[in-house]
Image: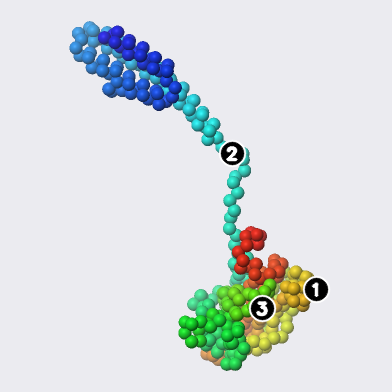
Amino acid sequence: MKEQLQKIYDAASADLTKATSIADIEELKLKYLSRKGELNSIKKNLKDLSDEDKRVVGAFANEIANKLEAEVKAKYDEFYKKELDEKLKKEKIDVTLTGKYVPQGHVHPITSTIDEIVDIFHTLGFSVAPDKNSPEVETENYHFDKLNFPKDHPARDMQDTFYTTIAPHVILRGQTSGAQVRVMEDMKPPIKIIAPGRVYRNENINSRKNNFFHQIEGLYIDKNVTFADLKGVLNEFLRLYFGASRPTRFRSSFFPFTEPSVEIDVQCIMCQGKGCKTCSGTGWLEILGAGMVDVNVLKASNIDPEVYSGFAFGMGVERLSMLKYAIDDIRLFFNNDERFLEQF
């Protein structure tokens, strides 16, 4: 039996010499050292030996098994280290290399401009009107009638206003001014709100105009509000948005829902007031209209004009952004050209 054990050891050693991988080692362990392996098969026959032979052969069997296990383990560790080194070389990463550039999205200039304007008016005490008071699909009643537009006003014409087929007198709003009426109906003075939103007009598209754009409406109603308050608030807004060195001007105008009314212009940044295609050669671009809320508008919202007064204003977001960042074509905001958007 000792001869058999020696033969098993010699055969295992020969197989171990021929092994070239961890897989070969695992196969060898299964053949010689597993529960059903050749060494254990010999050990099972020890019961047939005398007590003296059991002691001698058993000790030799354990010696052979321990020796073979040690050699197998040493060979296994050798192959494991070798294969691990090869794997590490193959999967090696140079951590000093720069990472792969993954382009990130940018906040759209319209969004960032609206956010900046809202932040400025927050500092001036204005809050944002609830969305329910500023719907994009509006009725003529709120869009025209309650804003003191005469029945024959040209803005009601199909050439300027998008009428829908939802129901008679339902339109896509061409201005955010309807928000001030809805707010005055829902709230009691004092009222100090702004209402950002999208508007739609049947315009010929060019570098200065689009049939879809953004406005921000403002309204301040309280006792003893004067034109001086209007000018003070808007001048402070312009100073905070453009900086104190940017030339601006107030000029008289007319809007059905304000009296007196003004328009505010900012010097064209593209030509520095010398005249170009963006400003149609005038050197100025109109950015907002404003005025004292007309008495008829207050009455239509059940606000007593003998007690309260106020002013309203509406500004074009695209115009403000164009004049701040020297953008000479309004269409760039809507073309989704990454070369333009990534600059912001």
The spot of residue 77 in percent (x, y) is 44, 23
> At numbered mark 2, what does the secondary structure look like: helix, strand or loop?
loop
Mark 1 or 2 closer to N-term? Answer: 2
Crowd class of label 2 (few under 14; some 14 to 19; many from 20; radius 10 Å)? few
Element type at mark 3 = strand
Q: Pick out the residue farthest to the top.
A: 52
Residue 320, quarter of the rendered image: bottom right
Q: Position of residue 5 (x, y in %)?
A: 30, 11
Task: From the image, tell me which residue sits under label 3.
Answer: 288
Q: Estimate the spatial distance between the alpha carbons at disc 2 and disc 3, rounded to whole Å.
A: 55 Å
For label 3, count other residues whose C-alpha is less than 10 Å away and answer few (under 14), some (14-19) or many (20+): many
319 relative to 100, above or below: below
User: Front-most of 111 and 122?
Assistant: 111
Residue 187: mark in rendering: none
In whole angstroms, how far apart are the C-alphas of marks 1 and 2? 55 Å
Q: Quadrant of residue 260?
A: bottom right
Residue at the (47%, 84%) spot, across then down? 167
Q: Is residue 201 left or right of residue 66?
A: right
Relative side of 36 to 210, left or right: left
Residue 335 lies, in percent from the top left, at 62, 66
Callout 1: few (<14), some (14-19), or many (20+) C-alpha neighbours within 10 Å?
A: some
Location of mark 2 (residue) = 95
The residue type indicated by label 3 comes to Leu
Quadrant in the picture for the N terminus: top left
Mark whose residue sits in front, 3 or 1: 1
CB of mark 1 within 8 Å of CB of mark 2?
no
Which numbered disc flags the more N-terminal residue, 3 or 1? 1
Which amino acid does the dot numbered 2 rest on? Val
Distance of label 3 from label 1 (alpha carbons): 21 Å
Nearest to N terminus: mark 2 or mark 3:
2
Q: Which residue is under mark 1? A: 274
